[in-house]
Image (spheres, rainbow, N blue to C red):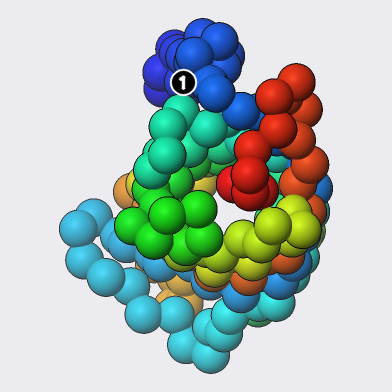
Amino acid sequence: MKKYSLLIILSFYSIISFGQDIQVGIKGGLNISNTWVNVKGADLEVEDTKSRTGVHIGGLLDVNLNSWAHLQLETQFSREGDDAAYFDYINVPLIFKFYPVKDVFHINIGPQIGFLTKVEGGDEGFKKTNYAINFGLGVGSKSGFTLDVRYGLGISSFIDEDVVFETEPNSIFNGLKAYTQVLQVSVGYKFDLSSKKSDFQK
């Protein structure tokens, strides 16, 4: 996974040289998150588990590949989790954006690497990295403002595999897997770094 993560980032920087237009920006907004838990292949229902509201904020680098496709690298602080505990991550999404409505509306999808920085109550038993897939929709304006709605689904468990859990009455089990689920609503602003300006903001 670590080699794959490095490959993603290096690939992005190699693609930059082919971009027709490069923009940088900032974005932030609301998280509505929860966790999905699985034990040895069977869903485990956790009573009274509710979603948690958090925030995310960070920067982005957007490369215009052609008239219908962009590649966007982001780095963001994100507070996620559920009502039992929150998790703070530094997330690095690599987003492919496709424009079915030219220059205005886009569909986005891409992988994400998350680096755990803090867990409410302590991070013992939690993996330091988390992997997810993102997909969503977004719109932009000529002034540079953006609006995005994105759903991130964890594809790797954030719990260490060798962690043992105790439940009542006096039962012990391991093999628990837990995955993040995050809905993000973001607003942002981008400005062009290219020497040749576009007729619009991507």
- The residue lying at 66 percent from left, 62 percent from top is 141
Residue at far front of view: 199
Which is nearer the eye, 13 or 178?
Answer: 13
Dot 1 crowding, Cα within 10 Å, few <14, some 14–19, many 20+: some
- The residue lying at 55 percent from left, 23 percent from top is 20
Which is nearer the eye, 56 or 114?
Answer: 56
Horizontal side of 181 relative to 148 (left or right) equals left
Horizontal side of 140 relative to 170 (left or right) equals right
Q: Image quadrant of residue 24?
A: top right
Q: Image quadrant of residue 38?
A: bottom left
Quadrant location of the N terminus in the rendered image: top left
Residue 12 seen in the figure:
yes
- Residue 171: image location, x then y, percent: 39, 67
- The residue lying at 38 percent from left, 43 percent from top is 68
Residue 111 seen in the figure:
no
Residue of label 1: 8
Secondary element at tag 1? helix
Q: Image quadrant of residue 124?
A: top right
Task: Look at the picture and state if 89 lies above or below 138.
Answer: above
- Residue 102: image location, x then y, percent: 42, 55
Q: Amino acid at mark 1?
A: Ile
- Residue 111: image location, x then y, percent: 43, 39
Which is nearer the eye, 181 or 193?
Answer: 193
Residue at far left of view: 41
The count of marks equals 1
Residue at far bottom of view: 48
Which is nearer the eye, 111 or 141?
Answer: 141
